[in-house]
Image (spheres, grey):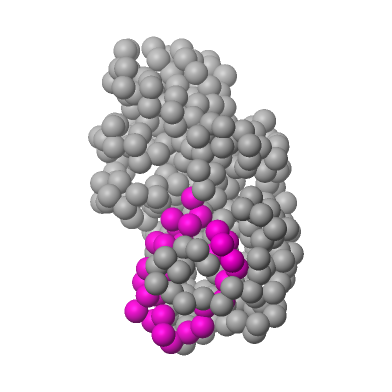
Amino acid sequence: MGGSVGLKGTDNVLAEAVKRGAFPQASAKVVRAFDCLLPLKNSFTLITSEDTMGEEILNKMGFECEAVYKPGSQNTTADDTIKAAKIIAEKNVDILAFAGGDGTARNIYDAVGESIPVLGIPAGVKIHSPVYARTPEKAGELISLFLRDKINKTQEAEVIDISEEDYRRDIINTRLYGYLKIPYERRFMQGGKAPSPQSEKSQQMSIAGDIGENMEDGTYYLIGPGSTPRTLMEFLGIENTLLGVDVVLNKQIVAKDVSETEILKYITEKPAKLIITPTGGQGYLLGRGNQQISPKVINILGKKNIIVAATNDKLAGLHGEPLLVDTGNQVTDGILKGYIRVITGYHDSVMYRVE
């Protein structure tokens, strides 16, 4: 919930997220995932939790469910997730699907360990753990194949989480919590988040020189998260937010760590461009850790005003896989599909595919 309002999640700040206008995302992502399972609904038994933890949205979609856990209140907690997952696992299910981010993956690990296959439907702000499908739709497709025995292979995948408290202070404190067993087919699953190696710094400075040289006066530049945009800010002599979105005008900082609402205010005042870099090892341009850059923002900017920067090493690390977008809006994702120019050095660029 906290992504669009600049909170990097809701751990210990749920009330503040709601106050800023955040709203739950998980149910909408479940609808996207389970839509392709509707034709199969009479061929499997669906076990879930009561109310907003599954039953409500699945019944609305037309599924018949057996609800085996009742949360203590409408404001559910990690404890509810763990209790519900334990009870569901005891029903000898073939697979347990869950929607959330890295914190939810930790809850599922605490509940079931490696005892049963599980699959994450991406719905969080931090999604570094490779237990999640690339998109909700890919999660639904993979579950469908698994239930029909079209995919039998499972493998261990890491459960990784970072401290949200540190994350909000621009400190990345990553920890491996354990492993979950997932049905595996590479084309459906996202990879684990990979850090940028020190050797990339000279390439990043070369990229910064190219972008900095071409920045236009009178235009707002939205500087996205990541080490490559941070190098641009260093090149300009501006302090930045490593894990947030900053606004620059005439090569001077205007606002730091802005929310979706603040971004919309700026980009309706003056011409604006967005500078982003894909996540290392995963290739996500949008939808992972930068939810402030929402479909509304993208629709106003247009694809032509999105500047993508990545080192050749980062692109090589994708092993030919496309760059990915998962904004939560299929029309917006469709606008971004195709090919986009990626700046890889000073006066150097390549055209790269986006899915």
- In the image, 36 versus 169, the foreground residue is 36
Asked whether residue 168 is in view, the answer is yes
At 44% from the left and 32% from the top, the residue drawn is 260
Numbered-mark total: 0
At 43% from the left and 18% from the top, the residue drawn is 248
Give the magenta-colored segment's residue range: 25-54
At 70% from the left and 58% from the top, the residue drawn is 72
215, above or below 91, in the image: above
Q: In the image, 25: left or right of 163?
A: left
Q: In the image, 110: left or right of 22?
A: right
Asked whether residue 245 is in view, the answer is no
Residue 241, quarter of picture: top right
Task: Give the image location of residue 233, x and y in percent.
Answer: 50, 22
- In the image, 24 versus 292, the foreground residue is 24
At 34% from the left and 37% from the top, the residue drawn is 296
- In the image, 91 versus 204, the foreground residue is 91
Magenta: main secondary structure equals helix
Which quadrant holds the N terminus?
A: top right
Task: Give the image location of residue 59, x and y in percent.
Answer: 45, 69
Q: In the image, 112: left or right of 93?
A: right
303, above or below 192, in the image: above
Specify whether residue 34 is painted magenta. yes
Q: In the image, 67: left or right of 146?
A: right
Residue 355, quarter of picture: bottom left
- In the image, 160 versus 23, the foreground residue is 23
Specify whether residue 242 is painted magenta. no
Task: Give the image location of residue 351, x and y in percent.
Answer: 29, 46
Task: Give the image location of residue 195, x and y in percent.
Answer: 59, 46
